[in-house]
Image: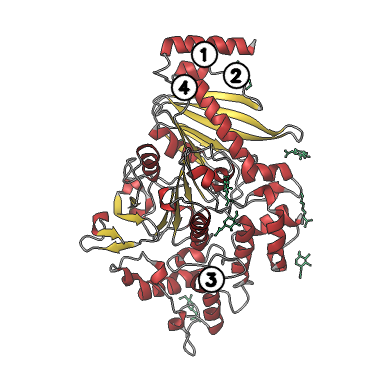
């Protein structure tokens, strides 16, 4: 009965719309009744007129705007393991003015909630059918209590399963809604980067924009605890107050390194050229210690940046890079530290809700790596199935040089392993399918003093334009569909990060390993810079 009704709807809608002019509308949204998708149930379909108020929030993400074009919001329940009764909540936002493509938007950390912010900011305004999932649970970004102990299906859903099933379901929903198969499938996300999806399921996407991906959780979480234990407890002589980071260390890093790139603007364009020497801040006898550094603090700072300078054999990728100091004191090396890592060990690895990070020892690195909770580690350097013909998938990867939660070295490391693998084992040129764009002065989740908005999702402000010059998703589409690969993208910094306040400056972000260089002229204009 259900099938017959759905078939009748398809037939009549096709007759009215014709196969070549698929369109959404209030009526098609109200009547939408997807048929025959196993394990997928439609729970609601709600139509929003152009400029209607879209005021939706969940524990992870929210949106409140009247700026969107008309769309149909489809809410789904996707059963992820019938035996266990586990499921994910997924939404597909279907604009009336569809551009013929789908985009899946990502999540962050251990968080669970449909990323309604990016469905509204990235997908719908550009005409994409947008897909997002709660990853199988509801929680804030650093909260892992939902994981256990022993909630294995939820952890697998978070690790890869919910997003994979959501991409499949979202494509099918899109096809049934518009009576046409999407011609391309993209991904945009930051933090919980979905490299795993292209490694395991090369057909899911034609191209992905992946920002600061936490692709190696089993190394990243021990590393985060290790960073934190360099300074904690806060009563120790090693601890550095947040105000010392912001008021003492940050200005000194700029003093030593800001001008190296030819322009003194509060942004370290090329942190790899900066070898910060904290000794210049050594306290003199009797000096107020909130204005200088003690010997123990100087030793600590060398440790925090050391991995970046020399490489670390235990955790593999490096430590802090100079330029993010204003955010360091409230992140991993704050008090309390960013709590994600402790929760990961408690609920995903040790099954011990009382465990505290002071109990950490390096043998837990091997344990975490061996358990690989949710199979979330996404470090295989073999991207051949995704990148090679006939698929020809593309990756645009960005990372803030001033990331305070995941070392930029994590991104560089993955990029280098893909190169090494391709050189040794394939005839592929990595530059033909994978490009990395470090962003000067950008923190994790896209804040910070640099030009931090270029269409990369995850709380970025809108790009200056949705074209391929200013919008990394536009650049990806042009690469996938027209074969024109980007080597720079013009990012924008809004005054106080508020678009309504106007543009503070524009600045290119450059394809690694090239860096942003000052040509001369107005430092607020991207045209005064080049990539070399
Ligand atoms: C339902 O799905 C099955 C299996 O994928 C397929 O064989 C069948 O044709 C589908 N039926 C309809 C009405 O789409
Ligand atoms: C969304 O914005 C409207 C208009 O400013 C306001 O009335 C409403 O309370 C907001 N919703 C939330 C959840 O803050
Ligand atoms: C589904 O959940 C059950 C019960 O927890 C578990 O035994 C089984 O391995 C799970 N299956 C998959 C494919 O994850
Ligand atoms: C914690 O539980 C998971 C299964 O839920 C198991 O795989 C893992 O080995 C346990 N950890 C320890 C340290 O026993
Ligand atoms: C040290 O400096 C801080 C911040 O400037 C100030 O709040 C504090 O009172 C000073 N302490 C002493 C002992 O002067
Ligand atoms: C490391 O920590 C784990 C969990 O707290 C503990 O079981 C183990 O005995 C510790 N190993 C060493 C060598 O201290
Ligand atoms: C890389 O992956 C492809 C596709 O999955 C596989 O055919 C190939 O054997 C892999 N290459 C190596 C060297 O492992
Ligand atoms: C080449 O592929 C083999 C087989 O998959 C792998 O063991 C080796 O590490 C790869 N080489 C590099 C440099 O990644």
Figure quadrant, ligand 8: bottom right
Q: Earlier in the sequence, mark 4 or mark 1?
A: 1
Coordinates of residue 477 in the picture (x, y in percent) = 39, 39
* Mark 1 or mark 2: whose residue is earlier in sequence: 1
Left or right: 249 as drawn, with respect to 349: left
Residue 67 visible here: no
Label 2 C-beta lies within 8 Å of the nearest ligand 1 atom? yes
Q: Which residue is mark 1?
A: 10
Q: Residue 222 location, x and y as percent? A: 64, 63
Give above or below for 131 relative to 223: above
- In this orientation, which residue lies closer to the viewer: 288 or 35? 35
- Residue 18 % position (x, y): 41, 13
Q: Is residue 345 left or right of residue 185?
A: right
Q: Nearer the viewer, residue 304 or 22?
A: 22
Q: Are marks 4 and 3 in contact (CB under 8 Å)?
A: no
Instruction: Name the mark nearer the viewer: 3 or 2.
Output: 3
**How would you rate the neighbour count of disc 1 (Cα within 10 Å): few for under 14, some for 14-19, many for 20 or more?**
many
Horizontal side of residue 33 vs 519, given as left or right: right
- Marks 1 & 2, CB-CB < 8 Å contact: yes
Q: Nearer the viewer, mark 1 or mark 3?
A: 3
Question: Which residue is disc 4 drawn over?
Answer: 180
């Amino acid at each position: 009965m259900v099938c017959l009704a759905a078939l009748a709807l398809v037939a009549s809608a096709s007759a009215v719309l014709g196969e070549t002019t698929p369109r959404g509308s209030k009526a098609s949204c109200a009547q939408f009744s997807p048929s025959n998708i196993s394990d997928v149930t439609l729970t609601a379909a709600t139509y929003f007129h152009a400029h209607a108020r879209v005021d939706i929030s969940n524990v992870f993400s929210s949106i409140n705007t009247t700026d969107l074009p008309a769309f149909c919001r489809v809410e789904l329940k996707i059963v992820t393991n019938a035996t266990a009764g586990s499921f994910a909540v997924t939404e597909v936002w279907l604009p009336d003015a569809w551009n013929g493509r789908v985009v899946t938007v990502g999540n962050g950390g251990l968080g669970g909630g449909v990323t309604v912010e990016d469905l509204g900011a990235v997908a719908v305004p550009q005409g994409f059918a947008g897909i997002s999932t709660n990853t199988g649970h509801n929680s804030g970004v650093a909260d892992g209590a939902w994981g256990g102990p022993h909630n294995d299906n939820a952890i697998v859903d978070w690790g890869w399963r919910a997003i994979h099933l959501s991409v499949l379901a979202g494509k099918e929903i899109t096809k049934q809604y518009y009576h046409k198969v999407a011609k391309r499938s993209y991904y945009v996300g930051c933090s919980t980067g979905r490299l795993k999806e292209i490694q395991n399921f090369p057909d899911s996407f034609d191209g992905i924009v992946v920002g600061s991906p936490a692709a190696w959780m089993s190394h990243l979480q021990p590393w985060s605890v290790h960073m934190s234990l360099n300074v904690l407890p806060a009563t120790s002589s090693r601890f550095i107050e947040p105000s010392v980071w912001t008021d003492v260390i940050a200005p000194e890093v700029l003093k030593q390194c800001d001008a190296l790139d030819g322009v003194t603007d509060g942004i370290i364009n090329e942190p790899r050229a900066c070898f910060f020497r904290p000794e210049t801040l050594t306290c003199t006898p009797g000096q107020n210690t909130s204005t200088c550094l003690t010997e123990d603090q100087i030793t600590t700072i060398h440790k925090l940046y050391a991995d970046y300078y020399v490489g670390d054999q235990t955790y593999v990728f490096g430590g802090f890079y100079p330029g993010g100091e204003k955010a360091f004191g409230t992140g991993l090396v704050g008090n309390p530290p960013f709590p994600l890592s402790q929760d990961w060990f408690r609920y995903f690895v040790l099954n011990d809700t009382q465990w505290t990070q002071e109990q950490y020892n390096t043998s837990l690195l091997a344990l975490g790596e061996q358990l690989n909770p949710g199979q979330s580690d996404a470090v295989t350097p073999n991207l051949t199935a995704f990148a090679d013909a006939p698929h020809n998938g593309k990756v645009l990867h960005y990372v803030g040089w001033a990331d305070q939660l995941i070392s930029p070295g994590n991104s560089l490391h993955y990029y280098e392993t893909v190169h090494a693998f391709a050189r040794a084992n394939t005839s592929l040129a990595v530059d033909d399918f994978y490009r990395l764009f470090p962003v000067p002065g950008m923190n994790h989740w896209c804040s910070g003093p640099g030009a931090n908005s270029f269409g990369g999702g995850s709380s970025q402000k809108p790009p200056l334009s949705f074209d391929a010059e200013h919008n990394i998703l536009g650049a990806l589409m042009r690469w996938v569909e027209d074969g024109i690969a980007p080597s720079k993208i013009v990012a924008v910094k809004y005054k106080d990060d508020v678009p309504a306040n106007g543009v503070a400056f524009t600045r290119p972000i450059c394809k690694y390993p090239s860096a942003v260089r000052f040509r001369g002229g107005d430092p607020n204009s991207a045209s005064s810079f080049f990539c070399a």
